[in-house]
Image (cartoon, grey):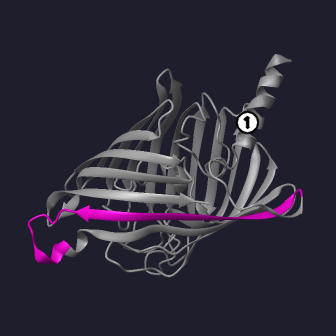
Amino acid sequence: MQMKKSISSSLLTAVALALVPHAASAWSPKLEVSETTWVQLGYLHQFWYQSVDDGAGVAGDRSRSSEFFTRRNRVMLLGQATETVHFFLNYDAASSNGAGAYQDPVLTDAMIDFRISDAFKVMVGRQLVPFTIDNNTSAVTLTGIDYPTRALANQPSTATGAFWRDDGISVRGLLAGGKIDYRVGYFAGDRDAGRNADDDGRMTGMVMYNFASPQGGWFFNQNSLGALDVLTIGAGYDTISRSGATAEDHEAWSVFFTMEKTLGAGHLSFNGTYIDWEGVVGGFGDGTSTSIQAAFLPTGSKWQPVLRWQQQDPENGSTLDTIGIGLAYYLSGHRVNIKAEYSIDDQFVDGSEVDAFRIQTQLFF
């Protein structure tokens, strides 16, 4: 009887966490048709100041330094159509880079989620591919100032402008009382006629084991600011088939972990990912990448220091080891905060490793 109660409790926790990244901050009031038919409007704005060293001092490089731009500018619609059918829509109209150029609004997410049971949910539409916890974490609840983008630089984005997303169908579920989390999908993949004349598809998947709180929703939360105790390990696989005579298939596999634990003096967040890449179009090519980051939020404090290390290790090219020293100030949790990071060996400019400094303000409503 006690075992059944424990399993039921775990699954209820997983359901409650289905929208954890969004529950951390308020959305608009619900516009309700009924208890199971409603919509909510959300807005995310992340504004950046960025200064990147100009390497050898070449004048043409200086346009990359001291830029203000909008990193994310998202209008989101969250809702429920029936008791078991939920949906999420996300348009982003941010700066396309740090040089003042702006992009047209991009359909970033457009998902319909059929929640048949805790063990089996089916989602169709444009969505993040299930490959690692890092690339499936909500932008609202990031630990550092941004994703470990140096380590994830090879993750294909086949939906134009919708980074790390693809159009297709996926299934996910929680098994064994929430201990096992699986996610697998079939997606459009590479639509380039020269590389994939037969329009072959893409298969991705990840499986995780939860030693503590499960997160069975759309997005992961790796920085709950003390709300969760989490210990999850997992592995992922991503393959994009190509039929072109000159293009090999893309193939990648990953191993990762994420941990959150309340200690006597505060709350520790710690996570890491290792990825092996092959057959990559764009990014830094074939090779490996690694990221590790840690943050500590002292009890009663709004200040959270963050340390992270990222590595790009291409087979044909120079290895880049990037160290980020960051600090976040949470005026109102994930709703309103300010983050800063000094990034040592942030990128290559004219073959030289250069540093960068970034500040971000975030508003989420």
Q: Residue at x 63, y 52 (%)?
A: 25
Question: Residue 132: in sight, yes or no?
Answer: no
Is residue 50 located in the magenta-colored stretch of the structure? yes
In the picture, measured across the screen, residue 98 lies left or right of residue 265, that is left
| Residue at image coords 74%, 56% | 122
Q: Quadrant of residue 4?
A: top right
Q: Quadrant of the N terminus?
A: top right
Q: Residue furthest top?
A: 2
Q: Nearer the viewer, residue 300 or 326?
A: 300
The residue that appears at 69% across and 43% down in the rendered structure is 17
**Picture coordinates of residue 134, whole percent (x, y):** 48, 49
- Identify whether 221 is placed above or below 59: above
Q: In this image, 27 relative to 108: left or right? A: right
Quadrant assignment for the C terminus: bottom right
Q: Which residues are magenta?
A: 35-62
Neighbourhood count class around disc 1 (C-alpha, 10 Å): few under 14, some 14–19, many 20 upward: some
What element does badge 1 sit on? helix
Which x, y percent locates residue 119? 76, 42
Under mark 1, the amino acid is: Thr
Label 1 sits on residue: 13
